[in-house]
Amino acid sequence: MNSAAWREPSKNVPVVWDGDVIVCGAGPAGVAAALASALSGAKTQLIELHGCLGGVWTSGLLSWIVDAHDKPGIMACLLDELDRRGARAHPGLAYDIEAMKLLLEQWCQAAGVQVRLLTRTVATYVQTSASNNKRLQLAITESKSGREAWRAKVFIDATGGGDLAALAGC
């Protein structure tokens, strides 16, 4: 076993965004959370590892929404819009993945959700108060833009694997 380690020099990480809500993970739950947040008036940032929104629905190539029938709210709107666009073979059957990607992007854009794709959450900064209460202050990401910090009042972990929560010590 190799015990060698490299001590990386410290550097300043730029805070590139400061807002109300950051959602990490843009699968079905993350997109829904970001839409709900933005539509309620919160300045919202959606951060996603993959190159598109939708998670298992799109990059996972599922193309089938299990148990979607007779669901109210956003699911009903989503299915109606896919049908309106001719993006489902038959009601209740497989949908066109590229149409789903486009629909989710258009909805997020219309709601005012700021989206960052191809960005991995890699660290967090948790502040401990004098009364020993802990609060997540920053999410740190890495992408082609380098290492960046994102600040918000509220963080939502929709990564599927609980990445943000684990990094924050939960």
Image (cartoon, rainbow, N blue to C red):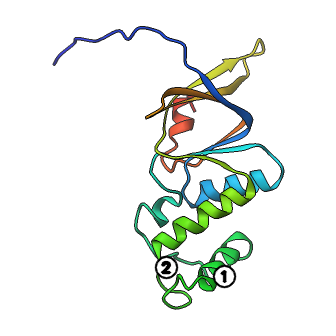
The numbered mark at residue 58 is none
Give the amino acid at mark 2.
Answer: Tyr
Q: Quadrant of the C terminus?
A: top right
Q: Residue at x 35, y 9 (%)?
A: 7
Q: Residue at x 57, y 36 (%)?
A: 165
Q: Quadrant of residue 62?
A: bottom left
Q: Residues within 10 Å of mark 1 (few under 14, many from 20)?
A: some
Q: Residue at x 79, y 56 (%)?
A: 39
Work out whether residue 170 can be spotted.
yes
Q: Secondary structure at mark 1?
A: helix
Residue 167 vs 71, above or below: the answer is above
Residue where numbered disc 2 is placed: 95
The picture places residue 4, in percent across and down from the top left corner, at 22, 11
Left or right: 52 in relation to 115: left
Give the amino acid at mark 1.
Answer: Asp
Of 131 and 71, the residue lying toward us: 71
Q: Earlier in the sequence, mark 1 or mark 2?
A: 1
Q: Quadrant of the N terminus?
A: top left
The picture places residue 143, in percent across and down from the top left corner, at 45, 35
Residue where numbered disc 1 is placed: 80
Left or right: 27 in relation to 107: left
Q: How far, Cα to Cα, is label 1 from label 2?
A: 12 Å
Contact, mark 1 vs mark 2 (Cβ under 8 Å)? no
Residue 110 vs 129, above or below: the answer is below
